[in-house]
Image (cartoon, rainbow, N blue to C red):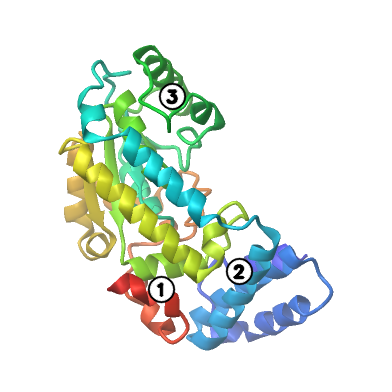
Amino acid sequence: MTNAWAALALTRKMTNADGEWFNSAEEIATSAIHPLEEANLRFAMGKYCDDVNNFARAFQNFKRGNDLLKAAAADYDRKERSHLIDQLIRVYSREAISNIGAAGSSSVKPVFVVGMPRSGTSLAEQIIASHPGAYGTGELDFWNSPALKEAGITQGILSEPARLGVAEEYLRILERFSKSASRVINKAPVNSDFLGLIYSVFPNARVIYMQRDPIDTCLSCYFQHFLTGINFAFDLSDLVHYYREHQRIMAHWRAVLPPGFILDVPYEELVVDQETWSRKMLDFVGLEWDARVLEFHTSQRQVTTASAWQVRQKVYKSSVARWRNYESFIGPLKSLGK
């Protein structure tokens, strides 16, 4: 009952006419329910308040939801996160990448859309996947798998036989999603960490890096009801740390990976000039122009990520500079604008 009531707010833009829904949600949230059920309601209540421009009350509810999730999750370990980035930068140095030698595979089928969560990765994937020659898998969990970590991807470049094996396994997975698509898109944001590994296996793959205003990005993460595994999103200071480490690894990939492997796509420009950037993305991944990508919101493909509702809408600009509505509440995030 609680989850179903919360879900009502997530299917459309709420209005003041939905005040009865909010009053009932508040009554349920303050009753004796499980903390995670309350968290779910608080995020829905926060969205309602944001929809009706009651920003102070929206932030209050989002904060309560995040506090409940943080209490239920493992602590975000800043030292561990920084150590992982240090290891990746050390292993995938410019010299190491230049000495890789034979590729795991010469396939051009893999396409990766990366970036911070809530940076526009779902929008980019939906646009490209609306092309008849492409298929979107959503957030495919592969490159951060325990098996690859056990193979020593943070200790050194994988051997040629190991890279060949990884390539064959990944292509088999893509084949299960679509036998006909010439490009298959994986939009898992975590792949931002593993572009060195991905390049060592698929040097002809293409990576689209979505960039969005850092404060808008992190605020959108804070307002999204994530699973407890995404524990950096429950605290504004943790979000700042995670974002800066994300910036650090992406700056490294830009410096050491060959030009033409990564295309930077600014979210704010994509929503203003959808056709220009859609053309650039299709050209970058090697697909001919097809006007159907401009009608991405009519696609019937299943979307299961946090942006499922948004990608059913036409491109909208209301999320640009959204953080200004919350400027007085987001102290730690404002350092990202400097």
- Furthest-right residue in this view: 32
Q: Element at badge 3?
A: helix
Q: Are marks 2 and 3 in contact (CB under 8 Å)?
A: no
Q: Earlier in the sequence, mark 1 or mark 2?
A: 2
Callout 2 amino acid:
Asn
Q: Spatial distance from mark 1 to mark 2, Cα to Cα?
A: 15 Å
Question: Can residue 54 be spotted in the picture?
Answer: no
**Which one is in front, 179 or 189?**
189
Q: Position of residue 174 (x, y in %)?
A: 43, 26
Q: Element at badge 1?
A: helix
Pointer 2 local density, CA inside 10 Å: few below 14, some 14–19, many at least 20: many
Question: Can residue 304 be spotted in the picture?
Answer: yes
Which tag is nearer the camera, tag 1 or tag 3?
A: 1
Q: Earlier in the sequence, mark 2 or mark 3?
A: 2
**Which one is in front, 160 or 136?**
160
Compared to residue 245, the image places residue 222 above or below, namely below
Residue matched to label 1: 333
Residue matched to label 2: 66
Quadrant for the N terminus in the image: bottom right
Callout 3 amino acid:
Tyr
Residue matched to label 3: 170
Q: Image quadrant of residue 34?
A: bottom right
Quadrant for the C terminus in the image: bottom left
Pointer 3 local density, CA inside 10 Å: few below 14, some 14–19, many at least 20: some
Compared to residue 298, the image places residue 145 above or below, namely above
**Which one is in front, 53 or 96?**
96
Q: Spatial distance from mark 2 to mark 3, Cα to Cα?
A: 35 Å
Q: Are marks 1 and 3 in contact (CB under 8 Å)?
A: no
* Rendered residue at 40%/48% (across/down): 299
* Rendered residue at 57%/66% (across/down): 10
Compared to residue 315, the image places residue 210 above or below, namely above
Tell me: 100 left or right of 2.
left
